[in-house]
Image (cartoon, rainbow, N blue to C red):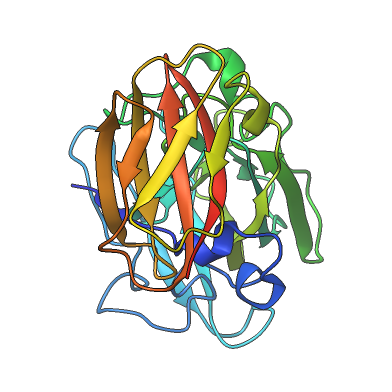
Amino acid sequence: MKQIYVLAAALMLTAITANAQQNVLVNGDFENWTEENPVNFDKAGTTVLYNDLLVKETTISQSGNSARQESKAQGTTQYLEYGDLISVVPGQSLTISYSYMDNDTKARTRLWSSWLNDANTALPTADQSNIQETEYSVENTQWVNKTLTVTVPAGAAKLRYQIRTYHQDGVGGGYIYFDNLSLVVNGVAGVNDNTIEGLQLFPNPVSEGTLNITSSNNNDKDVVVYDMLGKTVLSAKVTNGTVEVSNLTAGIYIVKITEEGKTATRKLIKK
């Protein structure tokens, strides 16, 4: 049902500011629609319906079009969800933002996204608190911009970008308006770079074919290298502290290293 949208690895680099400020959500401004739904916000699900009861709104919007979602009666929640799961790296700093208008006594909303692991299973509830709000919106005739910056927790591999619309006091049939959904990768926060004790990657820049990756424990490591387009260009199990990189062309890469469940990221320059 869900496709995997791989973030451009360049967006992980704090130093590359211009690229890092791009919104990775395609059509988060709801300008492009199919017959029923915004592009990349297709209806999905059977028991739980995603992106249901969405209507293009051209009058009440911040710019161009917005999406209006109707609340249902008690016991049912509506999900506004980006159609792709977004690949993330522990330690990344992300800024999530969107605008909404809650001018209806029969509806309310809140951010309720999810961190997932490689198997698309949600992380424990305690790890979700920075992207699952406890408070609901309050009635307001003006647009409200919601912005928060979060750090990807350990164990997370994907983000489900989701905002929910609820009935209010058991009464449905109200509306919430949404516009300008955004997800920006600010860079690697560096918190998780210290989780692998004594991690070293050398030489860097590397000009020959061998890259050394060592740590205090020197246990086996899973290494994934991403190019500047977010494509996986190398994936290896490192058992002897070295990985062959002779096939990499000159450029800048992101190296994701996992050892005993701990993950770190490093920038690699290939000459």
The image shows residue 166 at horizontal and vertical percentages of 54, 38
Q: What is the total number of numbered labels drawn onto the structure image?
A: 0
Res. 261 visible in picture: yes
Q: In this view, does 265 lie above or below 125?
A: below
Which of 24/234 is in front?
A: 234
Residue at 63 percent of width and 30 percent of height:
192
Residue extending farthest bottom: 64
Q: Which residue is drawn at 78% across and 44% down?
A: 138
In front of the other: 177 or 232: 232
**Residue extending farthest front:** 208
Measuring from the top left, give residue 271's x and y in whole percent: 47, 70
**Is residue 78 in sight in this rendering?**
no
> For this rendering, which residue is in front, 10 or 123?
10
From what the image shows, is residue 56 above or below residue 1?
below
Residue at image coords 27%, 51%: 234
Q: Where is residue 195 in the image (x, y as percent from the top left)?
A: 61, 21
Q: Quadrant of residue 258 in the image?
A: top left
**Position of 132 relative to 49 (above/below):** above
- Where 159 sits versus 84, above or below? above
State the residue at coordinates (21%, 32%). Answer: 47
Position in image of residue 83 (x %, y %)? 33, 56
Task: From the viewer's perspective, tell me whether residue 166 is left or right of residue 100.
Answer: left
Question: Residue 238 or 256: which is nearer the viewer?
Answer: 238
Residue 108, picture quadrant: top right
